[in-house]
Image: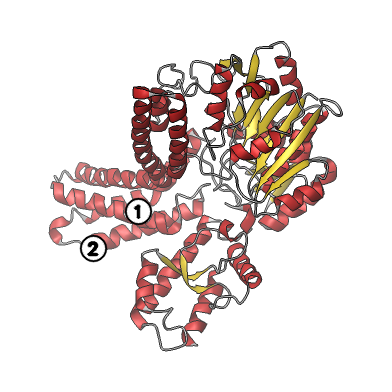
Amino acid sequence: MKLTVVVVSFNVKGYLSLCISSALKAMERLGQGQSELFIVDNASSDGSVDWVRRVHPEIQLIAHPENVGFSAANNLAIRQAKGEWVLLLNPDTIVPEDTFERILGHVQGRPELGGLGVPMYDGTGAWLPESKRGMPTPWASFCRLSGAWRMAPRSQKLNSYYFGHVAQDQTADVEVLSGAFMWMRKAALDQVGLLDEAFFMYGEDIDLSIRIIKGGWVNCYYSETPIVHFKGESTKKGSLSYVRVFHNAMRIFSEKHFAGGQALAMRWMIRLGIRLRAVSAFLHGAVQRHSLTVADVALSVLLGFAAVGLHGATTGMDHPWVPTVSLAVVGAVSTWWAGRWFGSSDRPFHRLRILMAGLAASVSVVLLYSLLPEYLRVSRLAASFLAVFVALGPLVLRGFLVAIRPSRYRWRTARPKVTVAAPQQAQEALVQWVRSSYGSSLEVDTATPPDGGVVQGQDRGRSDLVLVAASLGGTQCLEAIRSAREHAEDVRIVPQDLLLALGGLRRDGAPTANLSWGADGLGRKDRLRTKRRLDLLWASVVLVLGPGRGKYAAAFSRSNAWLVLQGRMTWIGFHGGWEGSDRLPLLAKGALFAGTGDRAPSSEEARRLDLRHASDFGWMRDLELLMNLRMD
């Protein structure tokens, strides 16, 4: 037997379906009896085990009663492997049909080869640098954890961790392979040993790669067979919690492979790297969340000075510095609150919301200016200039961004276009599912790949969302995802036997932010904003009128109202406590519960009420419930 494929799964049933279907197609190309597939489940709670048994009874399934970690789970299958080669494959991967066939053709002429890795692209179409890596020395680990490698990604000195001197399209020998796709010779594993089970998650692939090299074998990065690795569906890579887990894995690795001063340096480099990453992660997150708002505020400040300058140029008057700054601050504050209230920074950009935000900011400028003491006023004409500027500024700024970065920014269309790329026999069912999930106000198009070809972006036109049926094969899925960045499309993959839209270029993309919660669900930013407005309105009512004396007086207390104003509580929240409730949209703790205000008597009823609240939110319905409960 040529190949044994091992997939370790934990609560990723949808992605596991994609992985299995693509792997089985690639295995068929090797011939009957030439490959085997093991699925090792680490005590998943999402029904993965029952699903595999029902849909793929031919697969060798190992259902472990507890989560024993990545290393131990892989070793369970490797010990039973019959193949000449063993492939460790992540469940959130898709392999093209010719992947295994082409790799076998490459490795047959290299008897010294112990392991092999391939180029990996994430769900946004971005190439992943961890496709090839070097020895994690203290300096390399510091550059990786601190983010210094990003300053010179092609540098061998600053980016030795990701083997930056080797191009992503260059086949070359490397030092470390990725555990997401780790192709290894069984004879090499028999010699150097299996995965070290001291590593629960992360680091075990680095350790094994180094042991393969120390055993006299060679690791190779083979650039001719790219795959999809959605990356981090069960873990938040890049987050501080991930960095801490990674730090622990590196600590184990350094104690095992380094000694003396080098081991001490490794520990200090990693600690320093983590602190720098914590700062950079905070700054990066803040920039991503607030960059447009900051740009709006900065633009308003500039427009404030411009308004005063324009007034001075037309009248010949000189204006004191303090009133000029005061006017700029009025413009900044007005723009900030209006943009937050109307969601002018939501993407894709909504022209009406931006115009409403601009008009609200304009009115706010006039009102705030009228409230300023006389010594802080410049002139009514300058304030009028600023009111006009802030009304149009956000719209002009977004138009400029759309013009220069169409791959990142776009206008929201009245009828979002969704393209379903699928075999003809599956198109009708998928179109019906899309309409029922997203709503009827869509332009739904279909695309069928030409014989022997793929559905290219120019063939299907520009779409807000492209759903690609996994039944088209791994090659189609890979090419659709890789072209997503070029065509600024949100491409998602639909498994053959599960109606799910997986992956995605823009999680906040049109026509909705989260397919799971429908066209009017709380997965959308504007719905969450509407809920927040209702919270603020009702909190004001409670603070003014008091909690009342009815059954729910404790819930409507002024202390709860203050918590709602601070964003630490919402008036109507989820029940929770049922399997899968962790996937609900994130809400603060509720003073009352969805549906009736009271906690549901059973988990099934809680699930029904929570899903309704998440997928079909209505502010009028919530307001009616609040009014009724206060009078009860």
Residue 276 tag number: none
Measured along the vertical axis of the image, is residue 577 above or below residue 497?
below
The residue under the point 58% across, 36% down is 124
Q: Which residue is mark 2?
A: 370
What x and y, as percent, mark residue 147? 40, 30
Q: Which residue is mark 1?
A: 336
Measured along the vertical axis of the image, is residue 296 above or below residue 96?
below
Q: Using the rendered image of the protein, determine whether residue 151 is visible from the camera's viewpoint.
A: no
What x and y, as percent, mark residue 65? 66, 51
Which residue is nearer to you in this view: 382 or 156? 156
The residue under the point 54% across, 19% down is 175
On screen, residue 309 versus residue 614, left or right, reads left
The residue under the point 59% across, 61% down is 581
What x and y, as percent, mark residue 616? 61, 65
On screen, residue 279 versus residue 428, left or right, reads left
Bin the neighbour count of mark 1 within 10 Å (Cα to Cα): few under 14, some 14-19, many 20 and up. Answer: many
What x and y, as percent, mark residue 39? 72, 41
On screen, residue 188 versus residue 309, left or right, reads right
Secondary structure under tag 1 reads: helix
Kind of residue at badge 2:
Ser
Measured along the vertical axis of the image, is residue 608 above or below residue 336?
below
**In which quadrant of the rendered view does residue 38 lie?**
top right
Which residue is nearer to you in this view: 231 or 194? 194
Kind of residue at badge 1:
Trp
Quadrant containing the N terminus in the rendered view: top right
Compare marks 2 and 1 and give the one earlier in the sequence. 1
Which residue is nearer to you in this view: 41 or 601? 41
